[in-house]
Image (cartoon, helix red, strand yellow):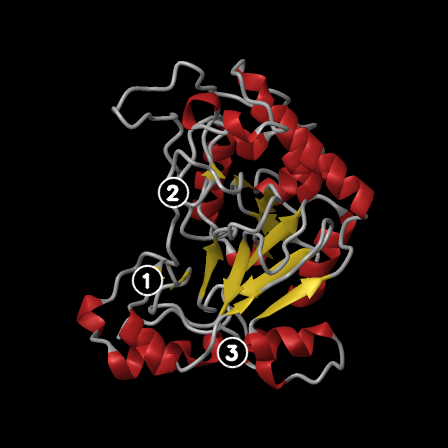
Amino acid sequence: MAILPVQSALLASAPQLETNDWLDEFYNSGYIVIKNAIPKARAIAYQQRAFEWLNSFGTDLDLENPKTWVKENLPIQSKINTFHNYAVMHEKFIWEARQEPGVLEAFSKLWGTDELLVSFDSLNVTLPNRKDVPRKGAWQHVDQGPFRRGLQCVQGIINLSYAGPEDGGLVVYPGSHRLFEQFFDTTTDEATWSKKDLYLFSDSQLEWYGIQPYKVCAEPGDLIMWDSRLIHYGAEPTKNSNVIRTVIYASYTPASFATKEALATKAEIFRQWGGTTHWPHDNIVARERKAIREDGTIDPKDRSEPLNKPGMTDQLLRLAGLKAY
């Protein structure tokens, strides 16, 4: 059985640590909400810059008028309301949010190092109660494949809006990460395993876990972190919500986890202003750079570089994997 090991002995023993702070809750539940990782006023300012980006395509989009919230007025989105084309993942405001001290401090504390890499991940802007697209059902999944064992990747959501019970947001199955290896070893055939770091669960498989889902609530400036072995999905807002969900996905792992080959691939993707998966140090797969419409043609408003480029500081270049620590 070709099993990838836990990245370090420290992480292998992490669930047994008793630190009497939020690390205990993270190891037990598989997720945590770090309150006020970014000052609320600054988080709301980041949201406004995300809205400015949305309005930069010269359409009739008016975020105060839901009647204009239609495909024709929006950049192309994925099925989960995310934007990962148009070089958006390298916009200046997104890189600034990724480098917020409170965000970096949280991931540094979790991993025990401040020498981190970050994913080139997406922007999510969910406009509630849109009439032109069908509602999306739950797609419970994990973002770590069964060949990997132990804590290997921690994902993050930088919240720029409210996420109440009725609003769009993250739904988790608390504690499911602790059953990850047992599930695959006892209920699945290794011959069916994929090296892709994504696994979707059927209803019967969720019944095996026997865990009830939980909607994570958060406020602007909060940071949500979760173990990639934790079953989760992004919930649609209910009909009672009028909140425009706005979040930045950002995962961080120690730079020491990355091979020279992975860093070289990551650096090349960065130079092309490209996006990656949730994984910062491995599984460095470039996302489709072109914004492709449903008819297979390229969006005439496609961009090959950010509208507002970030400053190439040493910190940014180290997080991006271009400069060594």
Name the disc covering residue 50, or none.
Answer: none
Q: Residue pushed farthest left?
A: 191
Indicate the position of residue 109 as horizontal and vertical percent values. 71, 65
User: Hey, what amino acid is under mark 2?
Assistant: Lys
Residue at point 68% right, 32% down? 93
C-alpha separation, residue under disc 3 versus residue under disc 2 = 27 Å
> Where does label 2 land, which residue?
79
N-terminal of the pair, mark 2 or mark 1, is 2
Q: Is residue 163 visible?
A: yes
Q: Position of residue 81 (x, y in %)?
A: 46, 41
Q: Residue sitting at 75 percent across and 76 percent down?
A: 21
Marks 2 and 1 sit apart, C-alpha to C-alpha, by 15 Å
Q: Mark 1 or mark 3, which has the lower sequence index? A: 3
Q: Is residue 195 above or below residue 58?
A: below
Question: Which amino acid type is shown beneath numbered disc 1?
Answer: Leu
Q: Are marks 3 and 2 in contact (CB under 8 Å)?
A: no
Q: CA distance from mark 1 to mark 3?
A: 17 Å
Which residue was labeled with disc 1?
200
Residue 196 placement: quadrant: bottom left
Secondary structure under tag 2 reads loop
Q: Residues within 10 Å of mark 3 (few under 14, many from 20)?
A: many
Question: Could you classify mark 1 by the number of other residues whose Cα lies within 10 Å: few (under 14), some (14-19), or many (20 or more)?
Answer: few
Residue at the (66%, 83%) spot, across then down: 17
**Three-letter code, disc 3:** Gly
Give the number of the mark in front: 2 or 1: 2
Q: Is residue 274 above or below residue 263?
A: above
Q: Is residue 267 left or right of residue 2?
A: right
Residue 175, numbered label? 3
